Image (spheres, rainbow, N blue to C red):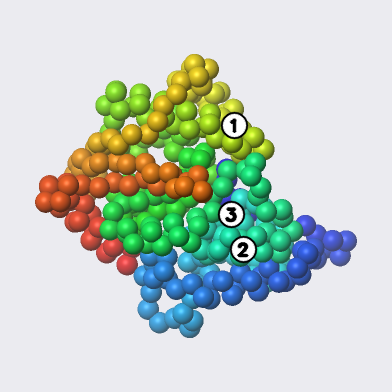
Amino acid sequence: MSTSEETPPRGAAGKPAEGPGGNDLGKALHGWRDRLSPAAVGLPAGGVRRAAGLRREELAQLAALSVDYITRLEQGRATSPSPQVLASLARALRLTTDERTYLYLLAGQPDPGPGHVPAHIPPGLRRLLDQLNGAPLSVHDAAWNLVEWNPSWAALLGDPSGLRGRERNIAWRHFTGRHGRISLTSEQRAAFEAAVVADLRAATARYPADLGLRSLVKELRQVSTVFAELWESGIVGTHESATKTIDHPEVGALTLDCDVLVAGGSDLRVVAYTAAPGSEAADRLALLDVIGTQAMT
């Protein structure tokens, strides 16, 4: 599911059409941006700031949108954002469930129902992720779209901020040959592929109305023989704790434990990489955390 920017519909006079809430959408976005500090989302303060909240550039980075589009939304010149854009904004602004519903209402879009893959991170899970910030963590939805990550994860596996659409989907990247820095043995690859295909099969049953999920599966069956064969076989697999080797260009190879945790009630997957205390991998992970922090600063 891509995060695309929308061209606002125009009326007979060539002016942007007004949404159901007029410019209430822009005011709400501005207010939510103002209340969120850079530190709360893992960003550096960045010198003198006119306001304590996020800059438009920072929100654009977090939501994978352009600064121009954020500006047009807040100024009321773009009034019809897509559900994908709204989902990205809700995650970036850390909205509560009620605030997220209000966001969709202001934008004139129906709040995604039970037939769609949920990507909203509940406040409780958000606090837990913040407290576990020392380990590389990422969050994925039931279709294995990358929803969020912390700086440690970006330092370990590469910053995904510039990725769009399918490039943020773990299944798409794997089955189309974009493996990144992770090295897998043949046994690890087979187990991972079985678990991912099983996840997607189960997701299509839980979220039959999600067009993005259906499109993902259809295209994967077309472009990947391996995926198509696994899908047709009806294979069943589960994600188990595994040891993975990450070939990092600066600190070398790190052999880490990888665990996939399913957050109850939200159907989100939390992927965590850890190393045994005192191990060489733990030392390299700590060094990488410093290097990554310095680079972001």
Q: Is residue 36 visible?
A: yes
Horizontally, residue 236 falls left or right of residue 87, namely left
Q: Amino acid at mark 3?
A: Ala
Mark 2 and 3 residues: CB-CB less than 8 Å, in contact?
no
- Residue 87 is labelled as 3
Q: CA distance from mark 1 to mark 3?
A: 22 Å
- Front residue (pair 204, 18): 204
Label 2 Cα crowd, 10 Å radius (few <14 / some 14-19 / many 20+): few
Residue denoted by label 2: 98
Q: Position of residue 42 (x, y in %)?
A: 38, 65
Q: Residue at x 64, y 35 (%)?
A: 208
Residue denoted by label 1: 205
Q: Give the quadrant of the C terminus.
A: bottom left
Q: Amino acid at mark 2?
A: Asp
| Residue placed furthest toward the front | 264
Q: Give the quadrant of the N terminus.
A: top right
- Front residue (pair 79, 134): 134
Q: Earlier in the sequence, mark 1 or mark 3?
A: 3
Q: Is residue 7 visible?
A: no
Query: What element does badge 3 sit on?
Result: helix
Query: What element does badge 2 sit on?
Result: helix
Label 3 Cα crowd, 10 Å radius (few <14 / some 14-19 / many 20+): many
**Depicted 295 relative to depicted 228: above or below:** below
- Front residue (pair 9, 107): 107
Q: Position of residue 90 (x, y in %)?
A: 56, 60
Horizontally, residue 245 falls left or right of residue 166, namely left
**Depicted 266 relative to depicted 102: above or below:** above
